[in-house]
Image (tube, rainbow, N blue to C red):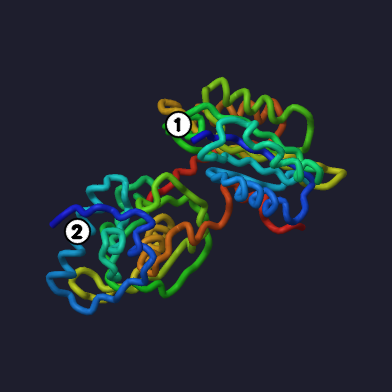
Amino acid sequence: MSHFALTIIGHDRPGIVAKVAEILYRLGCNIADSSSTILGGQFAMILIISHPRFRDGAAFGQAFEDLEAEGLSVFLRQLRPGEETAPKLEGELCMISVYGSDKPGIVYPVVKALEERRINITDLNTKLIGTADQPIYVMVIEALLPPGQELTELDAALAQLKAALQVDISLRPITPVEL
Amino acid sequence: MAVREILLYPHPILKEICTPVTRFDAATDGLIQDLLDTMIAAGHSVGVAAPQIGIPWRVVVVDVSHSKLGRDANHGQLVLVNPDILEREGHCISREGCMSVPDYTGNVARAASVVVAFCDRSGERRVIRANGFEAIALQHEIDHLDGLLFLDRVSSLKTDLFRRKHR
């Protein structure tokens, strides 16, 4: 079975999900993992889909042209075999909150510090809040600390960034509990 | 007695409303021992409910004393027959998973403190107040007795910070 990543983005309005789901249903596609959300005024969908017979993107034909005619952007990416499953990553899951008065250059130094430590970001949200006079930037990251790395080391590195960037940063483990 | 296999969703027993225990006889005691053995054998587990091992009776066992989150506030090993949550207080969110629903976790909002009435292994009626992780574990396991999984309680999609009401 071939797997594909499908992304659809467009101005938010009711009915986008239903249209996309109907097209996929009529094609005979399976929807596996997916995530959809509103960012700004845009609705963004990311779906991993599969089809028992479709071998490549061409097999979808003009299936998405109605969506595009309605102003939605559609992108289809074919996955190589095995790419549809996530490897089981070991480590300690943690949340990092970064927030402060909005200014250029908040995101990069923080994620660079994570990348330098081979810390894998598993989820990341940013949002501009506050008022027009006083915009506040908020970034929340869920990340996986590789085995052997201590939370305290990362905390110390983030404390340096906090001073350098003049933003607030906090770090905490989230320990998923299996009950 | 025996370590039992943990049933996985979609086993239908996991969605049943379980029956109250009426007799503290050998069958009930055997079930309790199986639950304890199963909980201990599943090294990472802090609780097991009877339906998870295939018995639709209102019995759960909980022990958070060996886990990092529950070490500092707990009642040790608890056997709860016909448990009933009398009071709920406070609010906390934690990332829960379940042995019966592998490979998935979700943020679940629960009371931070609960008062639970139950019968212990000898049939003695007890009432305890549990806080923190022990309270979460109790609510999770007692939910199993009503056919509820944490999936029925998921309160937000991962980061819930941005999903609160608009100002």
Q: Secondary structure at mark 1?
A: loop
Q: Left or right of A3: which side holds B21?
A: left
Q: Amino acid at mark 2?
A: Asp
| Vertical arrangement, residue B50 with respect to residue B7, above or below | below
Report the residue at 51% width, 30% height from top.
A83
Say which of A67 and A131 sits in front: A67
How dense is the environment of label 2, judged by Cα within 10 Å: few (below 14), some, or many (20 and up)?
some
Q: Quadrant of residue B26?
A: bottom left
Residue B132 badge: none
Report the residue at 67% width, 43% height from top.
A45
The Cα–Cα distance between marks 2 and 1, rounded to whole angstroms, is 34 Å
Report the residue at 33% width, 64% height from top.
B13
| Vertical arrangement, residue B123 with respect to residue B9, above or below | below
Instruction: Specify whether residue A100 is in view.
Output: no
Q: Secondary structure at mark 2?
A: helix
Residue A20: where, in percent of width, then height?
A: 67, 48
Q: Exactly how many numbered labels are in the figure?
A: 2
Residue B89: where, in percent of width, then height?
A: 49, 67
Q: Amino acid at mark 1?
A: Pro
Q: Left or right of B91: which side holds B44?
A: left
Task: List the residue tagged with mark 1.
Answer: A87
In front: label 2 or label 1:
1
Residue B34 badge: 2
Q: Chain of mark 2?
A: B
Q: Chain of mark 1?
A: A
Residue A61: where, in percent of width, then height?
A: 68, 36
